[in-house]
Image (cartoon, helix red, strand yellow):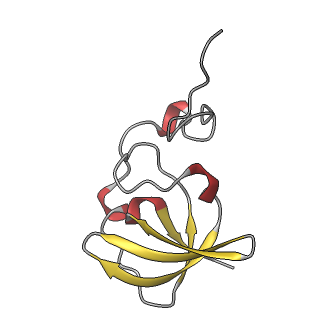
Amino acid sequence: MVKKSHGFRARTRSLMSKRVRTRGLAPPNRVLVTFEKGQRVDIVINPSFHKGMPHRRYQGRTGVVKEMRGRAVVVDVSLGKAMKTLMIRPEHLQVSKG
């Protein structure tokens, strides 16, 4: 029997892969975005950047910026009845439109 993988990126073949024409690093302005406290952000994982990547269960969720901590952004996200506090790099965040 083969042992099942339990890694951080397990079962993410389509979720954490880019389409052919979007491969490579994103433009620098994605990294240089500043977020304000209380701003709503969407978590959109960018597989080109491995540092500061949230777990795949948070892909597509919306949270509220709590603070900036170094290069990372502290975001509060609801997961069921629980509120989770995540430290995510700005490469994996977008300003929420809704």
Image quadrant containing the N terminus: top right
Q: Residue furthest right?
A: 80
Report x, y in % for residue 81: 74, 76
The quarter of the displayed image where residue 67 is located: bottom left
Q: Is residue 4 above or below residue 26?
A: above
The quarter of the displayed image where residue 2 is located: top right
Left or right position of 68 against 95:
left
Q: Is residue 77 above or below residue 21?
A: below
Number of marks drawn: 0
Q: Is residue 76 above or below residue 18?
A: below
Q: Is residue 42 above or below residue 17?
A: below
Left or right position of 56 against 75:
right
Residue at 24% across / 73% down in the picture? 70
Residue closest to the eye, 20 or 81 = 81
Report x, y in % for residue 92: 46, 59
Left or right position of 69 against 78:
left
Q: Residue furthest top?
A: 1
Report x, y in % for residue 11: 63, 33
Q: Residue furthest bottom?
A: 38
Residue at 53% across / 30% down in the picture? 20
Report x, y in % for residue 47: 46, 43
Residue closest to the eye, 84 or 65 = 84
Residue at 69% across / 79% down in the picture? 98
Residue at 34% across / 51% down in the picture? 51
